């Protein structure tokens, strides 16, 4: 067989070799805390009765608890890293990264770095000129004994940018961090499934038995089901993609178990945003792995596990005899559909075929036309769906669409009345001054800007809102065009740079999958210091992979020039 053949044996590359020092260890421990402690952290009470640890306050202040933990841990780590850079022991680090003068530091700033700084600068300008300064700085304010805001103020943005610079420079890949994240995610998802069937092992609902909304809409140690959906759009792509990348059998089993439990959790979470995020990363990975049989077989194995988990959940739900929380969103419909059986059978057959093919012809590479065909099919499907939505929204507004009404016809009721929030938000933006169009009305000011439109929410059972339920519209109103563009440049820039590093560092695709999944679900969800801090860490990991790739590539050139 010639070397030019498409079936030339291909050795799977490993993660890039990376140096490890105290500054790297500090950041890795910070990430480990964020992956293991942060998702399960709530207000604990210690007493003498089994199981000794009690979540006696349940969901009271869960957002503030996680916000405080993140801010404290980030501040401690950032301060420690800064102090370390000014010690004698850091001279080698500073020399290694050429951090000896201001000019060298500026020269090493990437497009993503500048975008992060631009985002922070925009938020600062927006805060300075905001009519709601307390809200803009702290992301929360109390008016007439009512608290408004989600903590997304300038202070949190500052910490996000500091964490980004810290992780993007000092993180070093170690698989045990992701294995620990998978184990924690499995625990969180298992509790969510149990909660759905009215089993409360952590005693989280004890204080909310008479509060129907909390009892129905809150799950596990994350909180509101939409916030749990955000978490799942981080945990699932991380576990799924790590199951493809890992070379350790035990770790692969852990990742696949986590994939199964995350899929079950998406169903009980009952939030359409999780399906949007999961679909986005699965499509991206299919394109990325489409030529490589070695990874494609592992991809379809993970997909088979996801579909099998969905059907197992359908059996459990049926066996429960209706003794579970209401499940009515798209994930439940997928679970109940007979088509899922067909998809499961197809995925299992493809998985078996790919394993056999890889066994007989190890490392075979499919033609370059394969990803092009897949992208074309996906693009055609997306265009078709958008065309149907436009048709039923602008041309045929009368036909009865049944259960698909809230998806295929965009109006005030679209997407559990997200439509009215988006439509009114565009009115707010259109009526804004030139300065507010450019820099917004200040971080977390959406509540005050949307007040005149509260009556539009009454018919849907809502009295007010402090979020557009679309992160991008939220940034547009709060931080203006400059804020939204810098945010997209920041996240998109890191993603693009990481994709270029995937060829030499396959693990970079793990970070990309998480970023893609989060950004997809953000179209219909809210940024909160419950899921967003984890997202920022993965954005920073994308930049870290790109920087490590560039650094490794530069070392041989530097050695050659010295010779």
Image (cartoon, helix red, strand yellow):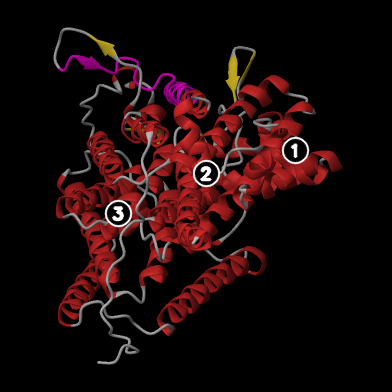
Dot 1 or dot 2: first in sequence order is: 2
Instruction: Look at mark 1 in the image and give the residue it sits on.
Output: 440
The single residue placed furthest to the right in the displayed view is 434
Q: Nearer the viewer, residue 55 or 363?
A: 363
Q: In this figure, which residue is indicated by the disc labeled 3?
A: 242
Q: Nearer the viewer, mark 1 or mark 2?
A: 2
Viewer-closest of 423 and 366: 366
Please report the bounds of the magenta region as a residue range: 51-77
Q: Is residue 465 visible?
A: no
Image marks 1 and 3: residues in contact by CB distance under 8 Å:
no
Q: If you read the primary sequence from the N terminus, does the residue marked by circle 3 or circle 2 appear first?
A: 2
Disc 1 on helix, strand or loop? Answer: loop
Place of residue 422 in the rendered image (x, y in percent of width and height, measured from the top left): 64, 47
Alpha-carbon span between mark 3 and mark 2: 29 Å
Which element type, helix, strand or loop, lies under badge 2? loop
Residue on which the image places disc 2: 97
Residue 49 seen in the current view: yes
């Amino acid at each position: 067989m010639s070397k030019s053949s498409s079936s030339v044996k291909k050795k799977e590359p490993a993660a890039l070799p990376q140096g490890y020092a105290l500054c790297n260890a500090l950041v890795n421990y910070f990430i480990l805390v964020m992956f293991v402690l942060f998702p399960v952290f709530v207000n604990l009470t210690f007493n003498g009765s089994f199981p000794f640890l009690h979540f006696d306050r349940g969901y009271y202040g869960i957002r503030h608890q996680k916000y405080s933990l993140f801010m404290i841990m980030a501040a401690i780590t950032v301060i420690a890293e800064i102090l370390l850079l000014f010690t004698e022991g850091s001279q080698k680090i500073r020399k290694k990264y050429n951090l000896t003068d201001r000019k060298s530091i500026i020269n090493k700033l990437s497009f993503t770095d500048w975008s992060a700084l631009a985002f922070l600068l925009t938020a600062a300008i927006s805060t300075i000129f905001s009519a709601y300064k307390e809200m803009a700085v702290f992301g929360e304010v109390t008016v007439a004994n009512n608290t408004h805001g989600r903590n997304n103020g300038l202070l949190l943005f500052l910490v996000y940018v500091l964490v980004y610079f810290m992780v993007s420079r000092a993180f070093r890949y170690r698989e045990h961090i992701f294995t620990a994240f998978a184990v924690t995610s499995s625990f969180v998802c298992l509790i969510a499934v149990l909660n759905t069937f009215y089993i409360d092992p952590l005693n989280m609902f004890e204080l909310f038995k008479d509060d129907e909304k909390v009892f129905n809409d809150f799950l596990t140690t994350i909180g509101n089901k939409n916030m749990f959906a955000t978490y799942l759009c981080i945990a699932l792509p991380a576990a799924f993609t790590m199951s493809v990348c890992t070379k350790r059998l035990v770790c692969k089993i852990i990742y696949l178990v986590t994939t199964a439990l995350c899929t079950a959790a998406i169903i009980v979470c009952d939030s359409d945003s999780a399906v949007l995020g999961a679909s986005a990363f699965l499509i991206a990975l299919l394109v990325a792995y489409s030529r490589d049989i070695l990874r494609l077989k592992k991809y379809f194995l993970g997909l088979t596990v996801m579909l099998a988990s969905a059907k197992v959940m359908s059996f459990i739900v049926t066996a429960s005899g209706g003794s579970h929380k209401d499940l009515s969103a798209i994930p439940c419909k997928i679970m109940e559909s007979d088509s899922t059986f067909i998809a499961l059978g197809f995925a299992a057959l493809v998985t078996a075929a790919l394993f056999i093919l890889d066994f007989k012809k190890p490392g075979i590479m499919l033609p370059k036309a394969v990803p092009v065909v897949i992208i074309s099919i996906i693009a055609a499907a997306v265009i078709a769906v958008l065309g149907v939505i436009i048709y039923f929204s602008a041309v045929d507004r009368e036909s009865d669409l049944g259960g698909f009404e809230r998806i295929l016809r965009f109006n005030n009721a679209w997407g559990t009345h997200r439509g009215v929030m988006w439509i009114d938000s565009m009115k707010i933006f259109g009526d804004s001054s030139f300065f507010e169009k450019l820099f917004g009305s200040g971080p977390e000011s959406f509540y005050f800007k949307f007040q005149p439109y509260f009556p539009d929410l009454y018919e849907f059972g809502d009295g007010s809102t402090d979020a557009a339920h679309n992160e991008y519209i939220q940034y547009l109103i709060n931080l203006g065009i400059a804020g939204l563009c810098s945010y997209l440049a920041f996240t998109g820039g890191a993603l693009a740079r990481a994709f270029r590093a995937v060829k030499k560092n396959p693990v970079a695709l793990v970070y990309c999958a998480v970023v893609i999944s989060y950004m997809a679900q953000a179209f219909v969800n809210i940024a909160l210091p419950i899921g967003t801090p984890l997202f920022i860490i993965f954005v920073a990991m994308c930049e870290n992979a790109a920087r490590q790739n560039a650094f490794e590539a530069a070392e041989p050139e530097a050695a050659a020039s010295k010779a």
